[in-house]
Image (cartoon, grey):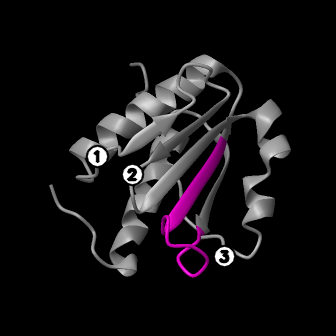
Amino acid sequence: MPIATTSAATRPFAVAAAKICDSKKASDIVVLDVRKLTTISDWFVVCSVTNERQSRAIADQLRVSMRDEEGLRELGVEGIQDGRWILQDFGAVVVHVFHESQRGFYDIEGLWADAPRLKWAPAPAKKKAKKA
């Protein structure tokens, strides 16, 4: 599997993770560029969900899609049992899936306030087929 070796090469992985979260109806999705602030990762993707089932569904989809479509294996995961804050480590990208009641408490965006936010566009919505 390919491994991104430069920081510039990792941006598409962060965008892909954000789009996966969006496809599973996560809200308030933020992509933080932490490349100049830490060596633990290049990007943080932070999103909110309304329930634990949704957070687990996002985590499952991230694990499969990041591996099959982006060539990145999940290096670690925390919080999958509780589902109120799931952290998935894909090396260059770390994804934080928060239950909306927990996101403000942990305030990842506040802790990394110096990190620039990456503008990204969600995948276009699929049009529903018209009935004849």
Query: Pointer 2: what residue?
Result: 90
| Marking on residue 85 | none
The magenta segment is 33-47
Quadrant holding the N terminus: bottom left
- Element type where label 2 sits in the image: loop
| Residue at (46% x, 37% y) in the render | 77
Q: Is residue 88 above or below residue 37?
A: above
| First of labels 1, 2 by sequence position | 1
| Residue at (38% x, 80% y) in the render | 8
Distance from the alpha carbon under mark 3 to that under mark 2: 20 Å
Query: Pointer 1: what residue?
Result: 73
Residue type marked 1: Arg
Is residue 123 shown to the viewer in this render? no
Q: Which of 123 and 19 is in front in this view?
A: 19
- Element type where label 1 sits in the image: loop
Few, some or many residues within 10 Å of mark 3 (<14, 14–19, 20+): few
Residue type marked 2: Phe
| Residue at (58% x, 28% y) in the render | 55
Is residue 82 shown to the viewer in this render? yes
